[in-house]
Image (cartoon, helix red, strand yellow):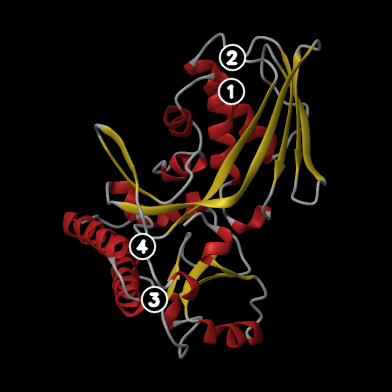
Amino acid sequence: MNPNRQLYTHGKLLITAEYAVLDGALALALPTRLGQHFSFSTQEEASIHWVAKDLNQKVWFESQFDVEHLIATTQNEIADRLTQIFRAIRHLKPQAIHSGLLIESTLEFDRNWGLGTSSTLISALASYFEIDPYALLEKTFGGSGYDIACANAEGPLSYSRSAAGVSIAPVALNWSFKDELYLVYLNQKMDSREAITHYKQRPIDSAFINDISALTRAVIQTQSLEDFEKLMQQHEELVGAQLELDPIGQTLFKGLSGTFSSLGGWGGDFALFTRKENIPSLKEKGYATILKLSELCRL
């Protein structure tokens, strides 16, 4: 373990299998071009000094943690979460945290965008302390782990998990219509844990998981925008029926052309949409953050 080290991890977007990836469905995931930088350096003081900066280089969180007891000097939700993570690291590798450290993190994306502030953190800490990132995720935030797979990926990937472990494979997206795929930020961030709790309250049918996996394979292989739109619409309808929620194409964006698909917990974060002609209408509705998918993600 190099005591002084620079690390960088990518953010993530899940294109298919939202929620269903938790129960083994095959998912299509994309690492983002934006991520989080981490700097680790040893210090004589027997504490972990954490400094977190946003994309404007402004410090948005700072605290110290006693190395022996891993108790934060700052009392808030972020400090409590880091305390949990450090204790999980020590549980997985008892000798991992034994000396003072200065850890500085710097985001390249807006903290509210839901692109993986937590997953980039878990991946970087697991790499520095040389432990299994999926084991660390399980003991802290939970979730499917697709975001951990994206953290160190250089391009699109398929992801699934089972009792035997995770399965990750790079995929080539030979989409001739990439320039017609856009992202719109929905002006609110969803709590992933709350979204998962809502999903878990409903019984999961194996047919639902199989259908989502089949759609993922078809989306990866599709060659036309029209077919892509049909597949994503089917995906929205399947997930909507499972959640007992109306897809955003039928609510927020009813009457617009093409297809709209939720990419995070339904109701927040980013949505994927097709066709450039929708942009003026979205801006009129107050959605200011609109990006090309290829601008934000590694396709």
Indicate the amino acid at tag 3.
Asp
Q: Nearer the N terminus, badge 2 or badge 1?
A: 2
Q: Which residue is mark 3?
A: 246
Reply above or below: 162 against 221.
Answer: above
Mark 2, secondary structure of its residue = loop
The answer to whether residue 22 is seen in the rendering is yes
Residue 216, position in %: x, y? 29, 59
Q: Which mark is residue 174?
A: 4
The quadrant of the rendering that contains the N terminus is: top right
Mark 4, secondary structure of its residue = loop
Of tags 3 and 1, which is closer to the observer? Answer: 1
Q: Is residue 251 left or right of residue 9?
A: left
Indicate the amino acid at tag 2.
Met
Residue shown at 44% from the left, 87% from the top: 257
Q: Nearer the N terminus, badge 4 or badge 1?
A: 1
Residue shown at 21% from the left, 61% from the top: 211
**Mark 4 vs 2: CB contact within 8 A:** no
Which one is in front, 118 or 105? 105
**Real-space CA distance between mark 2 and mark 1, rounded to the nearest whole angstrom:** 7 Å
Indicate the amino acid at tag 4.
Asn
Q: Which residue is mark 1?
A: 128
**Real-space CA distance between mark 4 and mark 2, rounded to the nearest whole angstrom:** 39 Å
